[in-house]
Amino acid sequence: MASATTKPRGPIISPRLFMVQNIVLRALAVVLSSAAGILMFTGKQSVELLQIQYRSNDSSALRFLSVTDIVVCGLSVLSLFFVWRLGPTTSNLNIYFFLFLCDLMTLVLMVSGCAAGTALGLISLFGEKKIGWVGVCDIVGRLCHQVTISITLSYLTFICYFLLTVMSAYKVMFLAK
């Protein structure tokens, strides 16, 4: 029987294209996360109903999401500068493994912020009838729309970091061969 030998395959994409994709996704993450954080911080609508005021900054989950967006924006700026300084010809496994770990930690941070914001957003929109909570989006519609847009931008940032994590893992796997 003849054994089939496989040659080690080269990278599917060129190093320059990999760097361009990395920079574009990181720049997009900066724009999306900063827009989401700013929109959440500035999203305020006070309505007095039975002497109760509704404000976006009263919710710890929405504060957590907005701080997460700002932290991810800062990490994205740092990693964007780091990737830009590396250049397309760098093939050091340790550097790409460090980048993979940073992307993975940012991804986990982003998913926790998105989950917290989504949970509170759904309760604000639909309420929780088993407990007797009613949705407040009928009362503070403008605020709910701002929060919805901010959460959507946060999920788009999450998708950018998911793609970056997969790309970094691929690069580490390729360099380890």
Image (cartoon, helix red, strand yellow):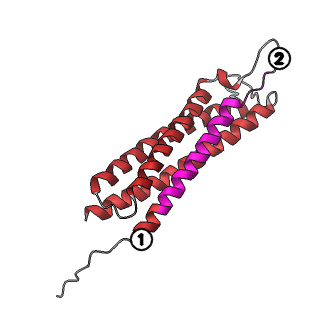
**Which residue occupies 60% across, 47% down?**
31
Rendered position, 137 above or below 11: above
Instruction: Tell me where residue 149 appears, x and y as whole percent.
Output: 70, 42
62 and 83: which is toward the camera? 83
Q: Main secondary structure of the magenta part?
A: helix
Quarter of the image that includes the C terminus: bottom left
Instruction: Tell me where residue 85 appears, x and y as whole percent.
Output: 41, 53
Instruction: Tell me where residue 136 appears, x and y as whole percent.
Output: 76, 27
* Left-right relation of 176 to 134: left
* Left-right relation of 87 to 151: left
Q: CA distance from mark 1 to mark 2?
A: 60 Å
Q: Residue furthest front?
A: 85
Quarter of the image that includes the N terminus: bottom left
Reading the image, the residue beneath label 1 is 14
**Which residue occupies 41% across, 71% down?**
14
**Which residue occupies 61% across, 46% down?**
32
Q: Residues within 10 Å of mark 2 (few under 14, many from 20)?
A: few
Badge number at residue 35: none
Badge number at residue 49: 2
Q: Residues within 10 Å of mark 1 (few under 14, many from 20)?
A: few
Q: Residue furthest top?
A: 51
Q: Residue furthest left?
A: 1
Q: Which residues are magenta?
A: 20-46
Q: Amino acid type of disc 2?
A: Leu
**Which residue occupies 43% across, 47% down?**
103
Task: Of the two numbered discs 1 and 2 on the same chain, state the one appearing first in sequence.
Answer: 1
**Secondary structure of residue under mark 1:** loop
Rendered position, 4 above or below 150: below
* Left-right relation of 106 to 67: left
**Secondary structure of residue under mark 2:** loop
